[in-house]
Amino acid sequence: MKAPRIWAAKPCDEQHAAAVARELAISPTTARLLCIRGLADVDQARRFLAPSLGDLHDPFGLTDMAPAVDRILGAIARGERVAIHGDYDVDGITSTVILRRALELLGADVIHFIPERLRDGYGLQPAALDRLHADGVRLVISVDCGIRADEAARHALALGLDLIVTDHHEPDAALPPALAVINPKRRDCPYPDKNLAGVGVALKVVQALCLRAGRTAWLPAFVKVAAIGTLADVVPLVGENRIIAKLGLEMLSAGPNKVGLRALLDVCGLTGKTIDSYHIGFVLGPRVNAAGRMSTPDIAARLLLASDEAMADEARALAGQLDAENLRRQKEEAEIVAQARTCVETDLEIGSRTVIVVGGEGWHRGVIGIVASKLVDAFHRPAIVLSVDGGIAHGSCRSIPAFDMLAALESCADLMTKFGGHRQAAGLTIDASRVRDLRARINEHADACLQPDDLRPRLWIDGTLGFRSITEQVAAELTALAPFGPGNPCPVFRASGVEVVDGPRLLKERHLKMSFRQDGRVMRGIAWRAAEREQFVAEHRTAIDVAFSLEQDTWNGDRYLQLSVADFRAPES
């Protein structure tokens, strides 16, 4: 079991925070949060609170954007067939959708190809280029993949195909030999925002095309879909990612939306609701992802591309398919999580190591990434989950903040057939006979660079917030800070010496519901997935320290603030 969380206070320059509060006429609480997030500059803080599409950078600041746009517009002018090559996750599907739709509006002869996980494997492959070439394609544009596809790029050259790579994954030392390679992480790229998702890079291509074509009014419609991919890919919600996510969510919520997107929102139960990052990450995103995990990602792509009202029945059917695939995904995932946890808890070779490396014959490759994330949550250790099939193991890796998973894989690169990804998430392929070697080598690397406290989860506290300081102004300003995610986490506050005046009561056998009192003010609260803390809370009901976020809830038509409790602690003496 993972150790109790360390409550760690985030540092803040209080003088800067006071100045920001005065300049922007906001509460000290909100000013402090902005400064903690590195937004002590008043103009920067103002843009963060009220971003606009005008704050987006010039897309031509991305290396190779100009020749890429020239080639795309040339292909359109000459009637050449263009193919968008995507990826099977939400980021890749939304990237495919927005770039294909933009090219269609510009009059292109355009098709798309998204590989199927089990049939085609990951990323840009020579076999896919052969199929596209045979279909008359003369220009291939990759989205959310291709940055390490050296073999495929050379194959494109041999076929006489022009290739434009757009990606956001970490590049190798040498770039693939393509006509253009657009990736803000290129070492020679001066673009100021390095954190774009794959769909963010695709959106920059769309933005550049709109600028060249004099169609800048089209851009907001693409931002809506880009927000889905950005939030689902869990990239830092700062800079352009924040602009895309915040404005995209507002437009998704306000509508009107195209018929395919409407059908998706409807099957998710989100029609008429204010859509936030939680809805994308845990309701809508998993359904889009389920297509690529369990069957074909083209179900999701076709749904999001549906724009003609005559396609309403087809869109509803496609949305229903996504819903069914998501239910199947949940069942498969639960079974593999149970098996994986049993391995960790009963096999010392697996469970006693710093990095969990666990696998099973025939585990569904579409869900092992989610399983890895669940193991990280449960044990607060990096995890690699492997699906073994015919002597080959396909792995999905997830990490903790202190551990660079991609660097760890690079330290034992000789063991694997291929690998790639990010610091916190990666994938690999390895001969099944070498899995024990991988477990040994990656743990040697981890043991050399991690300290015991790195394996204890931390709860970062943004400061103390007494109940008397929770005002309507503070609540409204916290809403303006959303959407929350990496780089802009949901604020967590601390209240000390709080009395539990009602409860704790079990809710759905998983959560705790209660009411708290401090300085004469009573606040309702829910501790999600905290049923095992019921006795602890009851024992300290006269005085307990609470770490919490603020959330809005509705009961009988009335909206009220409540505490979303992240953790409890006995009061410090």
Image (tube, rainbow, N blue to C red):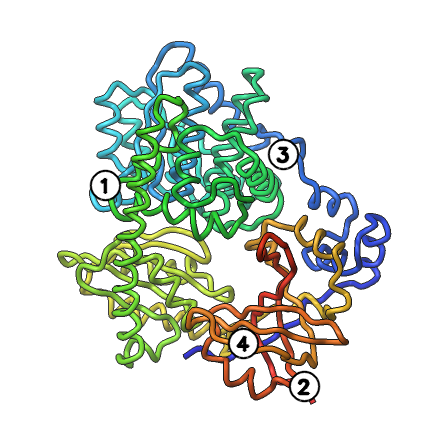
Dot placed on the residue nearer the N-terminal end, 3 or 1: 3
Q: Is 188 left, or right, of 85 in this rendering? A: right
Q: Using the numbered discs, state the Cα–Cα distance from disc 4 to disc 3 in whole angstroms.
A: 38 Å
How many other residues sit within 10 Å of disc 3, few (<14), some (14-19) or many (≥20)? some
- The local secondary structure at tag 3 comes to loop
Disc on res. 56: 3
Q: Residue under label 2, please give it.
A: 572
Residue 516 lies in what quarter of the image?
A: bottom right
Q: Is any part of residue 63 visible from this angle?
A: no
Residue 473, visible in the rendered structure: yes
- Quadrant (top left, top right, bottom left, bottom right) of the C terminus: bottom right
Amino acid at the residue labelled 1 = Asp
Q: CA distance from mark 1 to mark 2?
A: 57 Å
Residue 120, numbered label: 1
Tell me if residue 422 comes above or below residue 521 in the rendering.
Answer: above
Residue drawn at 47 percent across, 65 percent down: 400
N-terminal-most mark, 2 or 4: 4
